[in-house]
Amino acid sequence: MEQFETIAIFTYPSEYAVLRLLLEHNEIRHVFQNETMISVLPFHSNAIGGIRLKVHLEDIPKAKEIIENLNNSANLRIV
């Protein structure tokens, strides 16, 4: 995991459902850390530190571009 860096933190899985699809479609190496734990204990998200989107160092620029495009969209927004 030392080749991966956290570029975003989410509270609930529903906040990044579309983002996950876009990352997979663009073949960006990523992992959502703490996802399973928060699925089991959703009210502990803040205590655990949220769900961390970790992206491979080589894929960070493309991943950030995808997030920015979602934030600039009129219909979708990363919280």
Image (cartoon, grey):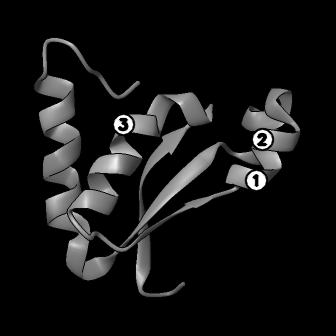
Disc 1 target residue: 36
Q: Which badge, 2 or 3, comes first in the chain's sequence?
A: 3
Residue at which label 2 appears: 39
Q: Residue furthest bottom?
A: 2
Above or below 24: residue 1: below
Q: Position of residue 53 (x, y in %)?
A: 47, 55
Q: Residue 6, how many percent across, how many down?
A: 45, 61
Q: Kindly identify the amino acid type of the residue bearing the numbered disc 2.
A: Ser
Crowd band around label 1 with a 10 angstrom C-alpha radius: few (<14), some (14–19), many (20+)? few
The secondary element bearing badge 3 is classed as helix
The circle on residue 18 is: 3
> Could you tell me which quadrant the C terminus lies in?
top left
- In this rendering, is residue 67 above or below 55? above
C-beta proximity under 8 Å, tags 1 and 2: yes
Crowdedness near tag 3: few (<14), some (14–19) or many (≥20) residues, C-alpha within 10 Å: few
Q: Is residue 25 left or right of residue 21?
A: left
Q: Is residue 32 left or right of residue 28?
A: right
Residue at the (76%, 53%) spot, across then down = 36
Image quadrant in which the N terminus is located: bottom right
